[in-house]
Amino acid sequence: MGRRLIISGLKLTDLSAPKLVTVDAIESSGSLLLIEPMNSAAPWAAGVPANGSSVVNLMKDFAGKLGVGNPAVGATIYSSGMSSPVGLFERSGKGGLHGIVSKLNTPANGAGFSIEMSDAIKSYLLANQNHKYFASVWRKVTRTGSIEQFSGVHNASGSTNNNLFIMGADLTRPLDGGATYAGSRVMNRNTVGNSLVNIGANGWVGSVSAPIANLFARACSWGRAPGVGGATSNVGSQVFYRFYLEDLTVSGRTYAEVDALDYAQFDKQVLTQGGRYYGDTHADPAALP
C-alpha cells in the first residue's frame, strides 16, 4: 500500500510540479463535480438509481473548498414514465447506466430519466456566471436519436439562447457554450459506439435563470425529462459512464490542458483493454422497438 508523507509548513513554489492525485487524474483546485458509477473512490450500489435518490460527488473535497454547500451530494435522479414500453433502464456489464428509449412508444412531455446537478452546484454556477468552465461526458451511444440534450446547463425556457452550455445529439445545432467557447471535442456524438463530448464554455449567454427552480443542469438525460425540447420521436439510447465539471477561472487551466487530461483518461478507461468500461456489454436496444 502506498504512503503519503505530510510535511508541515512546506510550500511548493513550482506550480508545474507533479501533484498527489486524491481521486482522479483530472482533478484540480477548480474541480466542481465528478459523477462516475464505477470510480473506485465511491462506486454506485447495484441496480438502477430510483427517482429522487442522491448521486455522490467524487470531487466533494474540492467543491467544498470553493464554497459549494453540501458538496458530497452531486446530483439527484429524476425518473418518470420511463418503464416499458416507453423505456428500459439497466446497469451495463461494466456498471454504466444504460437507458433504452422506444422509438415506437415515444415519451410524453416530462417523461424521462436524468441525472440533475444539485441545487448547491446550480447556486455556484449562478453566482459565478462569468467564469469559464470545462464540461465533459463519457458515454456509449447504443441507438442513435436526434432530440435529447444529454448534458447541459440552461434556462427552463429558450434553452438554446439562454445557457452556459448544451451538449446534445441534434447535429443541426452546434455545441453551445456561451456566446463563444474555447474549444470542444466530439467523438461519436450521434453514432453508435463509445463517445466523448466535452466543451470549454466562456460564460453564460442570454438570460440567467432565477430562481434555481427555473434552471436545468443535467449531467446526462434520456427521453423528455423537463427542459428537453424537440419532437416526440427519434429519441436516442445510451450508456452513461462519467460527467466532469471544472471552473477553469479558479483552476487557471486552459480548455486544451483539461481536454488532454480528459481524453487520456477516456482512452485508458474506455478504449483500452483493462479499462473500467472497456468491452462493455448491454441489452440490445432492439428489445424495445
Image: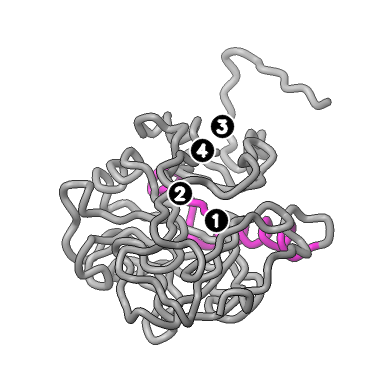
Cα–Cα span, label 4 and label 2: 16 Å
Tell me which numbered mark, 3 or 1, is placed earlier along the sequence: 3
Rendered position, 248 above or below 221: above
Where is residue 85 drawn, in percent x and y? 50, 70
Could you tell me the amino acid type at mark 1? Val
Query: Along the line of sight, which residue is nearer the eye, 57 or 233?
Result: 233
Label 4 CA crowd tier, 10 Å (few <14, some 14–19, many 20+): many
Residue matched to label 1: 258
Structural distance between the alpha carbons of marks 4 and 3: 33 Å
Would residue 232 be found to the left or right of residue 137 on screen? Answer: left
**Vertically, is 274 above or below 171?**
above
Residue drawn at x 67%, y 73% as measured from the top left: 284
User: Which tag, 4 or 1, sits closer to the chain's start?
Assistant: 4
Labels 4 and 2 touching (C-beta < 8 A) = no
Residue at image location 38% in from the left, 62% down from the top: 152
**Which of pointers 1 and 2 lies earlier in the amino acid sequence?**
2
| Magenta segment, prevailing SS (helix, strand or loop) | helix
Residue 246: mark in rendering: 2
Please name the amino acid that badge 2 sits on. Answer: Glu
Rounded to the nearest whole Å, what is the CA distance between mark 4 and mark 1?
22 Å
Q: Quadrant of residue 206?
A: bottom left
Estimate the x, y position of residue 274 in percent, counting from the top left.
83, 55
Q: CA distance from mark 1 to mark 2?
A: 9 Å
Q: Start and end of the magenta stretch?
A: 243-272
- Mark closest to the chain's N terminus, 4 or 2: 4
